[in-house]
Amino acid sequence: MLRFILHYGIHFILPIFVGIIFFKEHRLKIILILLGGILIDVDHLWANPIFDPDRCSIGYHFLHGYWAIALYLALFFYKRTRIIGLALLIHILADSVDCWLYSLPI
């Protein structure tokens, strides 16, 4: 249950929190872009099965690969693409926490 709460909390609550706290002027636009980071999960459609709760997305799915994470980090450092990079990095953070929690012995 903790894994579920943290994973989806980071996916959906953290972007709203970041938008409200750090981007007061264009709050709604920024929140929508940050929530849009979830769209990189489209790469799950090429996996078999599409959803496997016991699979770590990082390094497995195309848009969750290490080369992609490096690209998202690069996007974050340019002013014009910073919000998109942040959205994608928040997504990667959520999936990384999920992988880490899954790897812990129960």
Image: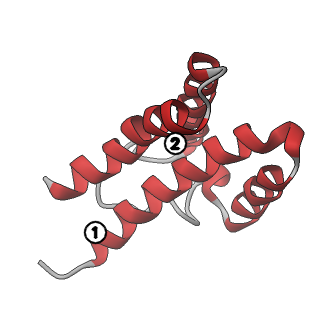
Q: Give residue 88's position: percent from left, percent from top.
A: 63, 46
The label on residue 51 is none
Q: Please determine whether, in this image, residue 78 is positioned above or below residue 65.
A: above
Q: Please determine whether, in this image, residue 62 is positioned above or below residue 23.
A: below
- Quadrant in the picture for residue 14: top left
Of all residues shown, which one is farthest toward the bottom?
105
Between residues 75 and 96, which one lies in front from this camera angle?
75
Left or right: residue 68 versus residue 6 is right
Residue at image position (71%, 38%) is 83
Q: Secondary structure at mark 2?
A: helix
Tell how many labels.
2
Q: Give residue 104's position: percent from left, percent from top.
A: 24, 79
Q: Earlier in the sequence, mark 1 or mark 2?
A: 2
Residue at image position (23%, 47%) is 5
- Quadrant in the picture for residue 16: top left
Q: Please determine whether, in this image, residue 11 is positioned above or below residue 2.
A: above
Q: Which residue is mark 2?
A: 44
Q: CA distance from mark 1 to mark 2?
A: 18 Å
Marks 1 and 2 close (CB-CB < 8 Å)? no
Q: Amino acid at mark 2?
A: His
Q: Secondary structure at mark 1?
A: helix
Q: Please determine whether, in this image, residue 53 is positioned above or below residue 36.
A: below
Between residues 10 and 46, which one lies in front from this camera angle?
10
Q: Residues within 10 Å of mark 2 (few under 14, many from 20)?
A: some
Q: Amino acid at mark 1?
A: Tyr
Q: Which tag is nearer the camera, tag 1 or tag 2?
A: 1
Q: How is the image coloured?
A: secondary structure
Q: Which residue is mark 1?
A: 102
Between residues 43 and 27, which one lies in front from this camera angle?
27
Q: Give residue 50's position: percent from left, percent from top.
A: 43, 41
**Viewport quadrant of the C terminus:** bottom left
Residue at image position (51%, 47%) is 47
